[in-house]
Image (cartoon, helix red, strand yellow):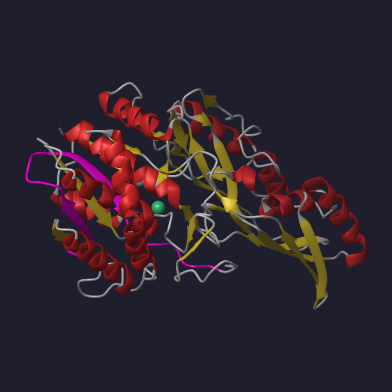
Amino acid sequence: MDQKKIEAYFEEHREEMLRDISELVRIPSEKGEAKPGMPFGEMPAKALDAGAKLAEKLGFSVRDYDHYAVAVNLNDCPRQLDILAHLDVVPAGNGWTVTKPFEPLVQDGKLYGRGTADDKGPAVAALYAMRAVRDLQVPLTKNARLVLGSDEECGSADMKHYYSLEQEAPMTFSPDADFPVVNIEKGRYSTCVRASWAEDVRLPRILSVSGGVKSNVVPDTAQAVLEGLPVSELSVYAAEAEARTGIRFLLREENGRVVLEAHGTCAHASAPGEGNNAVTGLIDLLCGIPFADSEGFRSLCAVKKLFPHGDWKGTAAGVAMKDEISGELTMSLNLFEYRSDGLKGYFDGRTPVSATDRNLRDVFCAFARSLGLAPDDEGVSPAHHVPEDTPFVRTLLKCYEQYSGQKGKCLAIGGGTYAHHLKNGVGFGCCLPGTDNHMHGADEYAVIDELLLGAKIFTQVIIDLCS
Ligand SMILES: [Zn+2]
């Protein structure tokens, strides 16, 4: 099949494809309460129905997997390729300026709206690729199947269900990531450290510390309640810590106690360097204040030694590591609670392919115990890795290079996609290197030319793998 014909096909169908994506974006398909026949709530089910209807309108046969997912088959031949995309979205959130989250809008070559990039745009691009292969009458001997899920953002129970009924296809990609090819998704070492002690009432003292909302989000706020020191004296320490950490501290008196608020910047746990951790910043400040010596205060200072502010690579813990194919380990203390008789801190670790229980967990735990902290018993869950040098990955890279004109290469990410548990599954598209589509944030958009490029590349991939 001639590349020019494929390119012309998508220029002809550009407007129609944008209209179909926009229809799906209008459905606010964030997870809701489960109802009969709607395992993830009304809106994800509605999005699946709309996806199925669109595929049927385009002339494909569709199979519903109990409203967890729907599958669109290109033909009746033996299955060769699964394409896994999702029609659920994360909540709209605040701060949208270009348009409302569920009112898609084209501006400056971009399609704005929640789900345009993650992942409704890429899902429709894959569907249109199947349509192009059929309309251009390319003879195939194998089947490509698009599987549309509805729970990617909340645990992927949709794909668990799909794979309880279906074998893994020989090859799978998920257009829910970046171009060129994501062949490594880091592993995890995420658990909790704890300490407990008998309450000590000597002053000055810390009554409580808390911060963080989810273990996979770098926290932007944290709070402490202190007793026995005046605001005037504490502000001196706060100003010094603010200069040191970049965290903003606010102090106020309340019922004879001082409430201390810390404000940093949140980030996804897979990229802690993009945020500024309010919890570790607050601990940094507290450990510099002359509180009465107590087991509690010593334990807090031990946490600081394990997770010093600004160290999100496990350097202090002695586990910093990286390898050429997957990059650096990241480790971030994201949820923390300190009471008068104990503390616990949950951290999120994203691990390179080379991480093991021996070189990571054992080293971390030995150091934590030497500081008097008790780590929970949790092992390293290994990274997902599909070797670069397979016919499948080589074909994806070739098609990417052919249509984008850019050099193809494999990437490692700290996040996870549908492909994480598949033997021969990778992330592939639709975001080009250098594009920040505000995924999960306000003003999410997809670059329209990138969606079209994705559709053209997918068309060629289906032809190359299924002929
Ligand atoms: Zn996604």
Which residue is located at x 26 percent, y 52 percent? Answer: 127
Is 119 displayed left or right of 61 in the figure? right
Q: Is residue 236 magenta?
A: no
Please state, as top left, top right, bottom left or bottom right, where the C terminus lies in the image: top left
Whether residue 84 appears in magenta in the rendering, the answer is yes
Q: Reply above or below: 277 against 259.
A: above
In the picture provided, is 272 more to the left or to the right than 163? right
Q: Which residue: 46% across, 34% down?
A: 412
Residue drawn at x 72%, y 46% is 301
Range of magenta residues: 66-93
Q: Position of residue 341 (x, y in %)?
A: 64, 60
User: Which residue corresponds to the image point at 15% horizontal and 47% vertical from the top-left?
Assistant: 74
Residue 303, placed above or below residue 215 = above
Frontmost residue, 317 versus 107: 107
Seen in the picture, residue 330 relative to 134 is either above or below; the reply is above
**Relative depth, front residue between 207 and 233:** 233
Whether residue 6 sits left or right of residue 218 in the image: it is: left
Residue nearest the observer in this picture, 287 or 202:
287
x then y, percent, for residue 145: 19, 47
